[in-house]
Image (tube, grey):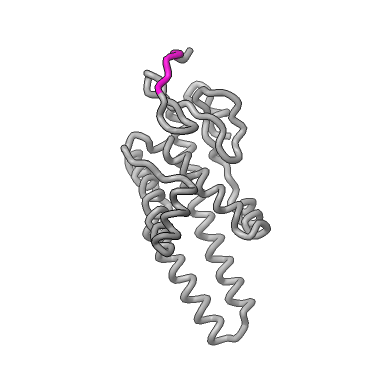
Amino acid sequence: MFNQKILKMEKGYVINENGEILRGDYFFTNVQELRPQPLQCNRSPWVMFLLNIITLGIYGTVITFAMGKETNITCENDGKHTKGFWATIGLSIITLGIYAIVWVIGWMGRESNFLRLRNEPVVITGGWYVVIAIISAVLQAILTSVTQIPLLSLVVGWLIAFLLMALVIKKHNRVNEIYNLEHFPENIKEATK
C-alpha cells in the first residue's frame, strides 16, 4: 500500500515519498494508526455552541485550533502554515490580542482560497468574521447602555456568536468534505462521515 520510507514533516505529522500526509492523534479524533484518513466534516454548530457555553469558551478554543491543524492538512499545497495553540496564545498575549485577529484572518483566508480554487462558495471570509464580531461588540455595548437590560445584550451577543460559529463550521466542514472526496474517492461514504 504505502511506501515505508517516511520523511518527518512536523510534530504529529509525517509525509511519505509520494507526498501523502500521514497524521497521528490530535485533539478529539480517533486516529489509531499512521495512514491517510478522512477528516471530520460533520461538526455541528449546535453541539459546539452548547459545549462552548458549558465550558466557558474552552471547548470552542480547542476545536478552533483542531480545525486550524486540519487546515494545515487540507491546504498544505499553498505553502503556508497555520500556527498551533501555544504559539498563537503566546503571540496574542504579547500583541494584546492583535495576533488572534491576524490568526483568524489567515486561517479563514487559507480555507477561502481552497474553496475558490474549486469554484465553491466561500461562505465567510476572515475579514467579514472580524467585522461582524466588532459590530456585535458595539451593538451589545449600545444595547446595554440604552436599554439598561443586560439580558437583551447577552441574547443578541449569543445569537450573533452562534451565526458566526455556524458559518465558520459550515465552511470548514465543506473544505474537509472536498479534501476527503479528493483523497479518498474509493470510499466516499466513509470520507464524508
- Residue 66 in the image: above or below residue 15: below
* In the image, farthest residue toward the right: 54
* Frontmost residue, 103 versus 87: 87
- Residue 70 in the image: above or below residue 62: above
Residue 125 seen in this snapshot: no
- Residue 119 in the image: above or below residue 45: above
Q: What residue is at 31 percent from the left and 37 percent from the top? A: 79
Q: Specify the quadrant of the image occupied by residue 178.
A: top left
Position of residue 63 measured from the top left corner of the image (x, y, whole percent): 55, 47
Q: What residue is at 54 percent from the left and 85 percent from the top? A: 145
In the picture, the quarter occupied by the C terminus is top right
Give the total number of marks visible in the rendering.
Answer: 0
Magenta range is 3-7
Q: Specify the quadrant of the image occupied by residue 20.
A: top left
Q: What residue is at 53 percent from the left and 54 percent from the top? A: 166
Q: Magenta part mainly helix, strand or loop?
A: loop
- Residue 191 in the image: above or below residue 137: above
* Frontmost residue, 119 versus 73: 73
Position of residue 51 measured from the top left corner of the image (x, y, whole percent): 65, 54
Residue 4 lies within the magenta run: yes
Q: Is residue 16 left or right of residue 36?
A: left
Residue 137 lies within the magenta run: no
Position of residue 111 measured from the top left corner of the image (x, y, whole percent): 40, 45
Q: What residue is at 57 percent from the left and 28 percent from the top? A: 190
Q: Is residue 152 left or right of residue 163?
A: right
Residue 159 seen in this snapshot: yes
